Image (cartoon, helix red, strand yellow):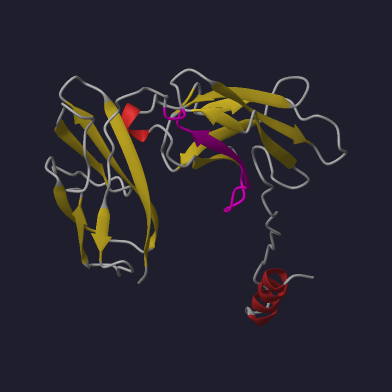
Amino acid sequence: MNSAWSIRLSLCAAMALGAACTVHQAETSGLTGPSELGLSFAVTATPDFITQNGFSPSTIAVSAKGPNGAPLAGRDFALTLQPAFGNLSAKTVRTGSDGTATAIYTAPAASPFLYGTPATTVWVFATSIGSDRQTALSQSAAIRVSPPPVPTEPGRPTPNVTFAPSNPKVGDLVMFDARGSFAAAGHRIQQFFWDFGDGLPQGEEGDDASHIYQTAGTYTMVLGVVDDVGRIGSTFRTIVVTP
């Protein structure tokens, strides 16, 4: 006997003699909508390494199974990217009769200044939706997105950059010096391009720059240079920022 039932009986017993007492047992309402119980699913990315050329795709597949291990049809999943880099053909997918739902991931074309720089890891998260549970289940798959290699072109300018302090902390002013960059004989560098790797806006255009990193982490700083006939050269540095 549950506690609410016992309390109501006690109240009836305490009432004056001859008074009528009717006791109603409340039924516990059941869950409505799909439940997470017994749900299992996995996320894959095929291929899991693509070139950042603006059109190479990776197929994201979400495969769901029910409590008995059979494919689960009609299940909805929300797809998100971390970091928010690139595009998905759909933000919500529903499994078909085979228990699988798919979407296509593509990355934006890399700037020529970024050619030859390290790959970026993008995580695709699938989260079950339409559940009664407070905490929805999530699974993820990783995609490595790599800029194209640096093309071999004679006469390209040569960028060079140093920075200080060499072991910056969050909030430090990091100074960058690209005055060691040079163009081929008879040419000159006409433009400098700076990317500090943290996604923050930057307006630096000359042969030196400064930047403040606001969060600890490992960043890829890119310097690009353009000579007077439009040839491009780029280089990068790995910067580890500590708290």
Residue 185: where, in percent of width, then height? 20, 29
Q: Is residue 128 above or below residue 172?
A: above
Quadrant in the picture for the N terminus? bottom right
In-image side of 181 versus 56 (left or right): left
Residue 69: where, in percent of width, then height? 86, 37
- Identity of the residue drawn at 30% across and 32% down: 233
Q: Give the camera-side residue of 98 and 132.
A: 98
In-image side of 8 versus 84 (left or right): right
Quadrant in the picture for the C terminus? bottom left
Q: Is residue 124 magenta?
A: no
In-image side of 217 versus 161 (left or right): right
Residue 187: where, in percent of width, then height? 16, 27
- Identity of the residue drawn at 74% across and 70% down: 2
- Identity of the residue drawn at 43% across and 35% down: 116
User: Is any atom of residue 128 visible in this view?
Assistant: no
Query: Which segment did they paint magenta?
Result: 131-150
Residue farthest along the bottom direction in this orientation? 14
User: Is any atom of residue 52 visible in this view?
Assistant: yes
